[in-house]
Image (spheres, rainbow, N blue to C red):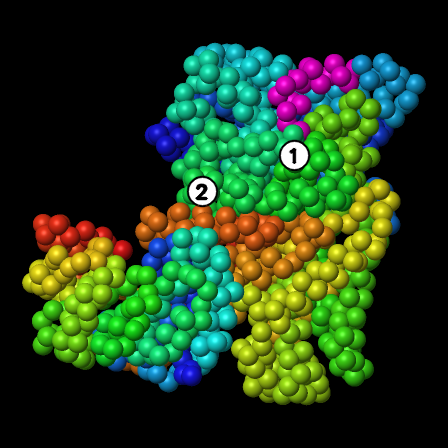
Amino acid sequence: MNERLTAMKDRVRAGEHHSLRQAAPIEILAECESRQLSWPRRVALLVRRQCEAERVVIEADERIVFTRTLPGIPPIYSPEQWTQMTAGKTLHEFGPVNNICADWDLLLSQGLLGRRQVALATRERLIDQPEAVEFIDCAVETIEAVLGLAARYAEAACREGREDIAAILEHVPAHPARSFHEALQALRLCHAVAWLSGHYHVGLGRFDQYMWPYLCSDLQAGQLTIESAEELLAEFFISLNKDSDLYPGVQQGDNGQSLTLGGVTPEGGPAVNELTRMSLRVSRDLAMIDPKINLRISAQTDLDLLSLATELTRIGLGFPQYSNDDVIIPALVSHGYAPEDARDYAVAACWEFIIPGRGMEVVNIGAVSFPAAVDQAIRAGLDARDDFEGLLRRVSENITTQVDKLGEIYSQLLLPPAPYYSLFMQGCLEGGKDLSGGLKYNNYGIHGACAANAADALAAVKQFVFEDGSISSSDLLSALDANYVGYEPIQRKLADEGPKTGNNDARVDTLLAGLFDFFAEACEGYGRTPRGGILRPGTGSAMYYIWLAMGHDGMREPVVGATADGRRSGEPFGANLSPALGVRVRGPISMLQSFAKIDYQRIFNGGPITMELSDSVFRTPEAIQKTAMLVRTFAQLGCQQLQLNSLSLETLLEAQKHPKKYKNLIVRVWGWSGYFCELAPEYQEQIIARHYYESSGP
Amino acid sequence: MSSGIVFDIKEFAVHDGPGIRTTVFLKGCPMSCMWCHNPEGQSRQPQVIRSRVGERTAGTEYTPEELAAVLNLQVAILRANEGGITFSGGEPLLQADFVIEVIDLLDEVHILLDTSGYGPEEDFRRLVERCDLVFFDLKLIDSNAHRHFTGCDNALILRNLSILTEMGKPFVVRVPMVPGVTDTDQNLADIVQTVRGLAGLQRVELLPYNKAAGSKYQPAGMEFKPEYDESQELNLNTALFEQANIKVTIA
């Protein structure tokens, strides 16, 4: 990293550009009202007014421009109107379309004028269909808005003597990009406008695929060297960190700016190229939380690439997250995805597999709480003197009830129109349809949260209550009700002596796999949603490892108290696929073997095995290669997704004491990396608890 | 048949030999090195460890069959990743019969013995015979100093070192670098004298002092009493080895 980039990074981390921001969001409600605009037209107006209100910012050392100055997204309906419109409906999270992936190649290869041409041709063809015409007019309005913004930037650049920037912005995003630099500038602007329009978790998709032709031809023509290309790429990556404090999320950093690398082409050939490696190198050298890198691999991926990726892990970025094509692609195909689409998957905000430009999928409609399903079954089953099989039947029923409930809630899903986002989706401009009406894929995904604790609880009950009788049903029920107060010996036995997930122990792994089988059956049994999609079961926990333990406003999932794995009420669960907090396991190999037993052909919504490595692992250079081998082993064992973290407990504890000194300390939280010191205390504590085990071994 | 006692099994032990390895820590050690960073490995008896994570017992009894079964579940993975199983401790020689039985029950895999070399010659021979590589610790060559800092004489260790080289096994000599104790030029020069020209010696590894060495004493109900200054800078004098044409690394 040269001085220019270092200075730029430091400025962004220090938030110097925040002083350029406008004091308040713009106001457009009155205009929407006085013009009696329809919903789609209000959304288009929002995009237009936001673009118009943006102030031009061109920093002296910038070569890729756009700095957001608008602090927020103004309402387009009054609260009363909004309540009325949404009564009886389900909004996904904050409402606007989010966590899908554009086909950014449509922008780069056609330019906005090319997209407008497509739109106008459709308008002509469907002129007698008012809805289609309105959608096209809205879409075109957003195109004009972005072109206007680009033109103002170009004029200002000219005035400031920055002919280089002016020349680029006079060409893109209006026209197809002619160079890597133009492609990055077009993407920066149009990606930022999606955020500015109220969309969030706006990902970058298969960056090394759609960007590669531009870089490749620049390299071949001698327009760029590897070094100069890396410098541009670094600047682009830094720019993605500029506005992230304005993004909505559960915690700072939870922004879904993910970027997918590697894997195979839609035709099935190898997709890794120089840009794949370049992106990894630049991300390593920058050490910032955005973009969040996902690397698609298979059992055949070479160790050199995995070693390069491990260098990011070594410095503690918490990414790349690895996705295993060997299991993911066949699972997508067997659930109705065309093979060429399945091979083209990207990773959504956290871990879910989505198809760029072809999916209006809601991949995180909620979570199944395995601990609640198991806890209710244990209480009711022991009370009714069930045998263990009967107890398992109750677990299955409880899971089905939870799945059905989420399915029913989302059968009322209301998706706002998204004319701007539709520009970059296949078939919207071509067919005169807004993406909110549905795309080629319209499935929902459900997380399967905190399975390790639930499986451990079942295994403990099976062994101590049903097999050796060392704990009586009534004592267990009383102990759970008392949150183990006065029942400490029972708590210790459950916590320390039962079989635990993550140790490749068939006694508990069978139950773990069984929980996911129940989950798969529940989703498969649900059938089609009103949007024509299916329910995709997954293995992620998202923030539910905290929420299911402590509760959260407006959450739909059940909260549980003390659980039969010896966990006390309020204590957080393990994140994603990981052993329960405080459980000692032998290490990464057994963990992978345990989680390899889940049937990923049925459980295919994603959710990583989450592994904490002590930073002492990376003391010697050979550790990079060995960690790369570990990642390859993950793929060879047929696991689905992996996320490795490297941190020391001491560093985390120090960072809590001296946050200023550690403001750049990065940690993986669930599906995303953030700055440790910017997290709420309960999330900090959960991460610290993950590291206790590593620090207490030999 | 003998059962054994193990205080931990740690996978992905990246510093314990080539490739991806799983290390078995055998509980019990005849030495009591002042700088020992695994004090719970010293006693043969299970012992309670109390820390902020809670309470646990270090020390699990295994029959050779039980331990081999656990390890055999992953032997294929270790083999595919140029690694294997490392027996460490504590001191594996103290449970030689048990370790030998376990090794004999293992599927084909690379075996590494991590030893202080302090144990009966007969046990040492039988164990080394079954290993592919030996990590042999040399701490102090001066026997008085050795007795003072480790609690035992080094004659047995030095004899086993010559047996090791006579057996033709490849080995690595590892020197824990303790400030002012083992890292003196005199001791390092003595080590050079001792190991130079030994057949089978692959390299000497200098292990920088573990500043967290004392952290596990209190949880294990033991007392940490270093007679040296932990904060003193280490004398990582690799030149002494290089001059004698001995390959040396710092771990």
Which quadrant holds the N terminus of chain A?
A: top left
State which region is magenta. A100-120
Residue B223 position within the rendered picture, expressed as x and y whole percent measured from the top left? 28, 80
Q: Tell me the chain of label 2.
A: A
Q: Nearer the N terminus, badge 2 or badge 1?
A: 2
Callout 1: 10 Å neighbours few (<14), some, many (20+)?
many
Q: Chain of mark 1?
A: A
**Quadrant where the image shows the C terminus of chain A:** bottom left
Seen at 50% across and 71% down, the residue is B69
Q: Residue at x 82, y 28 (%)?
A: A433
Residue B40 location, x and y as percent? 35, 77
Q: Residue furthest right?
A: A128
> Mark 2 is on which residue type?
Leu
Q: Which residue is mark 2?
A: A303
Secondary element at image label 2: helix
Residue A260 position in % (x across, y down):
57, 37
Callout 2 crowding tier (Cα within 10 Å): few <14, some 14–19, many ≥20: some
The quarter of the picture where residue A9 lies is top left
According to the picture, the residue beneath numbered tag 1 turns out to be A344
Give the residue drawn at x 36%, y 63%.
B111
**SS under mark 1:** loop
Q: Position of residue A371 (x, y in %)?
A: 68, 67
Q: Main secondary structure of the magenta part?
A: helix
Q: Identify which residue, A384 or B101, lies in the foreground.
A: B101
Asked if marks 2 and 1 touch (Cβ < 8 Å), the reply is no
Above or below — where is A640 with respect to B2? Answer: above
- Judge from the rendering whether residue A161 lies leftward or rightward of residue A463; answer left or right: left
Q: In the rendered structure, does residue A195 fall within the stretch colored magenta? A: no
